[in-house]
Amino acid sequence: MLRRYQYRLYPTEDQKTLIAKHLGCCRFVYNWALNLKNTAYHDGGISLSRYDLTNQLPALKEELPWLKEVNAQSLQQSIIHLSRAFTNFFEGRAEAPTFKQKHAPEQAFTVPQSYTVDFKQGTVKLPKIGSLKVKYHRTFVGTMKSTTVIRQSTGRYFLSIVVEDGRKPPQPADPIPDQTVG
């Protein structure tokens, strides 16, 4: 079963700058991919897949060298998030995806791998950011799937880690016919 653990982050001023770069670049790639996908559909009736968009990412990084300053997997994860947003839209679970805004109340980027958690030191090491101080109020056991860095509009930072703990989800209880209403 997947479980999510959220911890408070305490980055230094330099690390806050690097996190802001990651947030901005991931937002830019998401908006770029959304614009490209909408334009291709409205102009030619073509639906671009996430693989088509991911394959165009290296050319975009050559055109815009400041995208190389952040973790490439986080940029790819932005395109995966966009793909998931369109899937949710077409299956009726959500509204159509919209462009991300710089001044949103909460901003986040995902790091799918290449990060390490150290409970004894109270740190997490993220690619291209370094070692960040974290307040671990509880530990976890299992396989780490991904981590997300979240910045709130209040200036607080959080680390959200998704863990596969190996347990099976509980089975729902069958309703009792005489006691069930509705």
Image (cartoon, grey):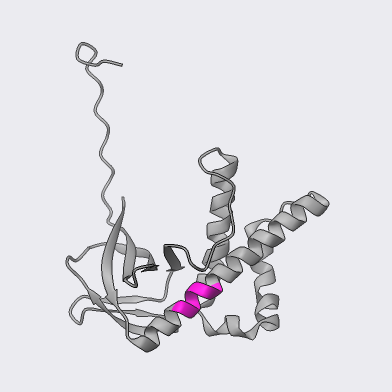
Picture layout, residue 90 above or below residue 64: above
Residue 73 visible somewhere in the drawing? no
Q: Is residue 111 left or right of residue 50?
A: left
Quadrant location of the C terminus in the rendered image: top left
* Percent position of residue 175, x then y: 25, 21
Majority secondary structure in the magenta region: helix
Magenta span of residues: 20-25
Picture layout, residue 16 above or below residue 97: below
Q: Quadrant of residue 7?
A: bottom left
Residue ranking furthest to the bottom? 14
Q: Residue at x 54, y 52 (%)?
A: 84
Picture layout, residue 170 above or below residue 37: above
Residue 34 visible somewhere in the drawing? yes
Q: Residue at x 52, y 74 (%)?
A: 24
Q: Residue at x 65, y 79 (%)?
A: 61
Residue ranking furthest to the top? 178
23 is within the stretch colored magenta: yes
* Percent position of residue 141, x then y: 23, 63
Q: Quadrant of residue 105?
A: bottom left
97 is within the stretch colored magenta: no
* Percent position of residue 146, x then y: 39, 65
Nearest the viewer among 23 and 138 is: 23
Q: How many marks?
A: 0
Q: Residue at x 68, y 83 (%)?
A: 62
Q: Is residue 20 left or right of residue 171?
A: right
* Percent position of residue 149, x then y: 38, 70
Nearest the viewer among 156 and 21 is: 156
Q: Quadrant of residue 161?
A: bottom left
